[in-house]
Structures are given as structure tokens and as C-alpha cells.
Amino acid sequence: MMDKSNTLEYINQIFPTESSLSGVEPMMQKIRNEIRHVDAEILVAVRQQSNSGTKAKHDLALATQAIKELMHKIREIKMKAEQSEAMVQEICRDIKKLDFAKKHITTTITALHRLAMLVSAVEQLQEMATKRQYKEAAGQLEAVNQLCSHFEAYRDNPKITELREKFKNIKQILKSHVFSDFSSLGTARLKEDSNLMQQLADACLVVDAFEPSVREELIRTVCNKELTAYQQIFEGTEVAKLDKAERRYAWIKRQLRANEEIWQLFPHSWRVPYLLCIQFCKVTRSQLTDILDGMKEKPDVGTLLQALQRTLEFEEELAERFGGAPALGKDGESDTEELEDGLDSDKQTASEIRKKYEKQRAAQAGTETEPNRGSETAKESPTAGFGFNFRGIISSCFEPHLIIYVELEEKTLMENLEKLVQEETWEAEEGSQTNILSSSTQVFLMIKRSLKRCSALTKSQTLFNLFKVFQRILRAYAGKLSAKLPKGMTGIVATATGTDQIKISDKDERVICYIVNTAEYCHETAGQLAENIAKIIDVQFADKVDMSEEQDEFSAVITRALMTLVHGLETKLEIELATMTRVPWAALESVGDQSGYVNGISTILSSSVPVLGGLLSPVYFQFFLDKLAASLAPRFHLNIYKCKHISETGAQQMLLDTHAVKTILLEVPSIGGQSAASPGYTKFVGREMGKAEALLKVILSPMESVADTYRALLPEGTAADFQRILDLKGLKKVEQQNLLDDFSRHSSGINIPQTSVVPAVPSSPSPTAPSIIGAVANHEDVLTRAAALGRGAATTGFKRFLALTEAAKDKKEGPFRKLFNT
């Protein structure tokens, strides 16, 4: 059935436009004709089908009869096939019997033939064993073993059991002859008698024909015989002492050279010299362990290290002789290269170290997905050895006793650290661009040397113990740096101000900056030191190598030093802020240039900030600026409350001073060498100094609108702060009461905002005091224009400001007239 959507498309195709609908009738007539034609064809088809029904029934009957005949013929064929199969089985019955008989006879003949061969081979082997014909016996053993494998199914047969027992006895005789002949190894007669040496070489062929356990037993016997003299010489004698360790290794090397012809008797696959050295190492390790454990007192460090060094050299010789690549670090580089590349940064700055460290990390990240070429080469390249690692097989017994070496290293490092700190000039080296103390580079240089010494001896527990020593050394150095910082003073001034009073000189400021840079250098280098130690130390200790706590110590030194700088400047500025409170603000008759305490603040910051900006890194200098602003701006605001009484003229002068201090703070970053102050710093200074400006604007407001101005400019202010402002305006308690009551009534329904941001100018003026807010806005414009003249032309700027204010006073109307009306 045609889909509805297709029908619609068909109709729309035939009649695409409204004008084409005129052809609907012709189209309908055409469709009716086609329907009549189709109905006629259907009628003809139905008539033909009715006529062919009788013929179809007749054809079906014929097909059914043909199928029945076919089934009858199939049954006949099946019956004849069964008769044929029975006839074939009857014919082949006798042939099967004959075939089975032939098979059994063939098996019997083969077994008898092999039995005859086995009997003959056993007899020949017995004769060869008696005559010690090892070369022939080796081949005969292989033949007998193969023949015996054919008679596994006949183990219970008496004859086979007898032959097996006889073969077993012959093997035992051969074994005893071979072991007896090998007892002559090491004698002078063996080297002189070439026939005997050839006989022993043939005996090795016999041993190879035996079970593998026989070969292992023979090698063990040969090795034990060789080491019997060694055990007698180096056990409980004078040469067995720890300081004679190199004689042990000289002995085995002499034996290997002297008996080189003897070792050639053995097949190369037996690895006799190799196994002899392994056995020697185990015996030596056992003896050295007994010597070290049996000492009543701690061994001498020099003797212990010398014995360990000789042992390591011997192990390295064995590794080179019997195979084994040089010890590689985890990234495929040698340990020596790791130490050289990782710690050779004595003259680098912290930023250079950081760049190098990030470069290394990026390189490692890029190669993590690639195979380790060094390790692949070691695995794929053929070696002369057999896979045994000689490194540490003897020297590991020294590990539990190396604590005295670690203690000596710690004592030496601590003494050198004390000496370095005592000799420190607390000045950067002349011509150096790093601005760090020379003692820091010397500390890491002596750590590098100590690490090299230890890593050449061991990379296990002792190296990890030494790493802990490095941690203590760095913590001690961090303590030395912290102890050099100027300490806070105690007394009446510190108690009264509630701040840390730290008196610092210009030299102290430079020293503190050097300490900050040095601590940053130590922080970065300590992390790199841990990274490199983790690469060369044994895997089980790598995850425990961490310098995060020591890095935190240096970070704490940096923070403490920067806060000391802030407190030091606070102490210098405290005198100027105290001078501010002693100015007779109520007795000022006219507004002049900026006050003397503002000039003092400017002088202090101008002398200190450029030095600090030149020595500190941008990050730490910005931290210093943030802390300084967070200290000075709020304290300046609180100092306004410490003034007893401020007249309108005094408030104008103080407003001028406040704007000058704000300008100074905003210019401090550029004084320190920054191209531009950070947005956060600028916003913070503007917000905090805006509070002081808003407070002074409230003091300047007329008495009838002071409450409205206070709520507009200081929306977070409290009734207590409002009362303090009234005190600053010089109102008596009785005069204050009405204003306080009015403030309380209007403030009871106001939700105090939680934010501490105080806009310099309210976004929408209060309907109760539009003229006041407008005056404040215009006054703010005047201050802004005055500040635009810059600190370098302060006098000219402030005179211009005074001219503007005097012109405003002369006007009869306008916002400034009300603000400055006396």
C-alpha cells in the first residue's frame, strides 16, 4: 500500500500550483479508465485459473504415483547392499586373523632383536667400564639408555629386570671410576701426564651421559676440594683478619690463573670456574660475616671501608669476567652520570635549577612511552656470563656494620656546616648574579661529595641512612638561616602597639634578602637531590626518599624572613605614625603642603624598597608588598582614631595626607622595579586607604548630616565607631546624644553588608543628603587631579589643590561652599 507521505508527494508533484488544479477532471477520467482496464484483466485471470484447476489435480496424482515407485526401488537397493556387506565380511574373516598374526610376529622379532642388542651393549659397556675406556663408554651409555627406553613396558619381565640391574651396577662402577680419577686434580702429576688429562676429558663425556645430578655432584666435589685449602688458610689465622681481605681475592685469582689448563678439561657448558667463584663468594661471605659479628668492639672505619672497597673491586672483576653490564640507573644512565649531572649545580640560581628540573621532567615524560634502550641492549646482547649477579654477593655482609661510616659522615658534615656558617660573610659573592650565600653552595657541594663516596660503596640501607643524614644537615642549615634573622624587641613600645618591634638596618635588609634567595635555592636543590638519590638507590628504598619536610623548612624560612622585613619596616614607620597622632589637628588654621610624617614615610620606603626589589625575586617582592600594604593601610586608618580632636581644617589637611600616603603606596611597586603593580595590590590599597578617606569625609561633613554621611560612606560602621567620630569632631557627650539616638533609629532597619569593601564614592546618593554626596564626589575629583601631578611635583600639586579649595570657599553656592563653610 502506498505510504501516505508518498501519496501527498505524488499529488503535489502532479498539481504543484493552484492554477494546475484545473486539470483535476481529466486526470480523474484517466484514472477511471485505468481502473476499468485492470478489472478486466483480473476477470480474465480468474477464468483461466478455474479452467486449470482440473489439470493440476491430475498432475499431482501422477507425481504421487512416481514417488511410491521410487521408494520401492530404494528399499530393493538397500537390501542388496546388506547382502553384499555380509558376503565381504565372510570373505575377509580369515585375512584379519592372518594380519594380526603377522603384526605380533613382527613385534616379537623386533623386540628380540633389540633385546639381543641390549644384552650385547651391556656386556660391551661392562668391559669398557672395567678398562676405563671413557670415550667409548660415553657413546655406549647413550645407546644403552635408548635401548632401555624400548623395554619400559616389560619392566616386570625377569630377564629385563636382570639387565636393568646389571646396567645400574655398571653405571655405579663408571661413576666411582670417574670420581676416583678426578681426585687427582690439582696434583703435579696431572699436568705432566697428558694421557691422564685426556682420560679426564673423556670422563666428562661419560658424566654428560649420566643424569644431571651426577654432573652437579662432580662439580660440587671439585669446587669443595679447591676451596678446602682456602678455608684452612683464611679461617682463624692471622691472614683471616678484616684488614687482610684483599689477600682472599688474590688467592682465588691465582688459583684461576694457575689451573687454567685444568678448567679447560671440563666442557664450557659446565661453567666450572664460574661455579667455583660463586662457591668462593659464599664461603668468603660466611667467613667475613663471622668476623664482623664476632668483633667485641666496633671496627675501625678506615679498615672497614678499605675491606669493602677491595670487595667491591673483586665483585666488579667477576662481573666483567663472567658477564654483566655496568650498573645502570632507572633511566638508563650510569650512576656516575646521575651524580655529576644532578648535583653539579653549585653555581646555578634557583630559577636556573627550576628550568633544568622542568626540562628533565619533560624529557622523562617524553620517553616514558618508549622502551628503555639501555635495558633492551643489556637483555638482547649476548654476554660471556650466565646471568648471575656478582655485585653484592660478598659486600652485602658489610651493610649492617656501616652505621659507623654513616655516623662519621654525619659528624664530618655537621662540623663542616658549623665552620661554613661561622665563616659566612652574609654577603653575596662579588660579581655574582644569584644573590645567594656562598655557604649554601658549599653545603650542597659537600653533600655531593659524600653522596659520591657512599654510592661508590653501596646503594642499599647505608645510602638510605646517609640520605637521612642529608635531611638533618639541611634542617640544621635552615635553622642557621632562621637564627640569623633579626629578633623582635620586647618592651613598652611593643606592648603598647601590639606589634612585633624589629629594628633592622640597611645591611640587615640585604642579609634578609640573601637569606630569602638562599632558602629558595636550597628548596629547589633539595628536591632535585631527592630525585637523583631516588634514581640510584635500590628499588625498595626509592619510594621513601623524600625531601618535602626539608623543603617545608626552607619555605618557612622564606616566610619568616619576609615577615621580618615587613616588621622591620613597620618599626621604622611606627615613629612616623606616632608623630601623626601628636600633630595638633584641632589647632590647624590652614591647609598646607603634606605633613612631615608623610615625608618621613616616603623617605623610609624610598630608601628600602628599591634595594629589596633589586634583591628579591618578583614573586617574593610581591608577597612583601602585599604584607606591607596589609599592615600599613589599616594601621594608618586606626591612627586617625588615636588623634584626640580634629578640626575641619585638620580633617582637610589629614585628607590631603591620606591621599598622599595612598599615592606613595601605589607607587611603591614601581620604586621597587616592577613595571606595573598587580591589580590585586592596587585594589587592596585603594580599598583600605579609601576607608581612611571616607572616615575623614565624614568628619568634614556638617553636623546636621553627619549621620547620613556616615551611613552612606561607612555602611558597615557601628554605633561605637560613630561615637568615636563625634569625639574626633569635638562634640561633648550631651551634644552627641541626639545624634546617637537618631543614628540608632535609622540604623535599626538597615542590614549591615558583610563585605569589607568601602567605595570611595557611594554608587547612589542618599535622598536625605544629595548636596553632601555631590560635594564629596566633586572633592574626590579635586584630589584625583592633585594626585595626577605626581609625587615629584608634590608642592605644586598641593598648591593647586589649595587654590581650588579657596575658589570653592569664595562661591556663594555649590557643593564645595557647604563642605568648606566654617
Image (cartoon, rainbow, N blue to C red):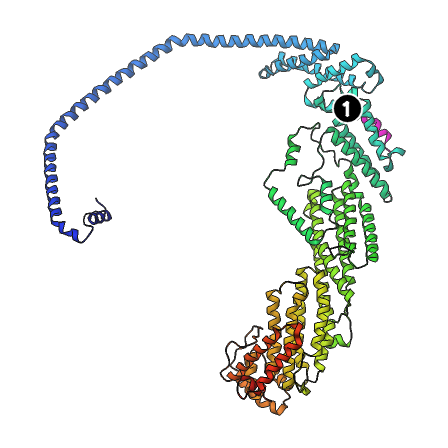
Residue 229 highlighted magenta (yes or no): yes
> Is any part of residue 545 visible from this angle?
no
Q: Quadrant of residue 503?
A: bottom right
Residue at image x 76%, y 76%?
493
Looking at the magenta stretch, what is its main secondary structure?
A: helix
Q: Quadrant of residue 609?
A: bottom right
Residue at image x 76%, y 47%?
448
Specify the farthest residue to the right: 238
Tell me if residue 556 comes above or below residue 630 in the rendering. Answer: above
Tell me if residue 452 comes above or below residue 556 in the rendering. Answer: above
Q: Amino acid at mark 1?
A: Thr
Q: Quadrant of residue 119?
A: top right
Q: Does residue 707 appear to the left or right of 432 in the view shown? A: left
Instruction: Find the magenta span and give its range.
Output: 226-236
Relative image position of residue 811 (x, y in whole percent): 55, 87
Tell me if residue 429 comes above or below residue 567 in the rendering. Answer: above
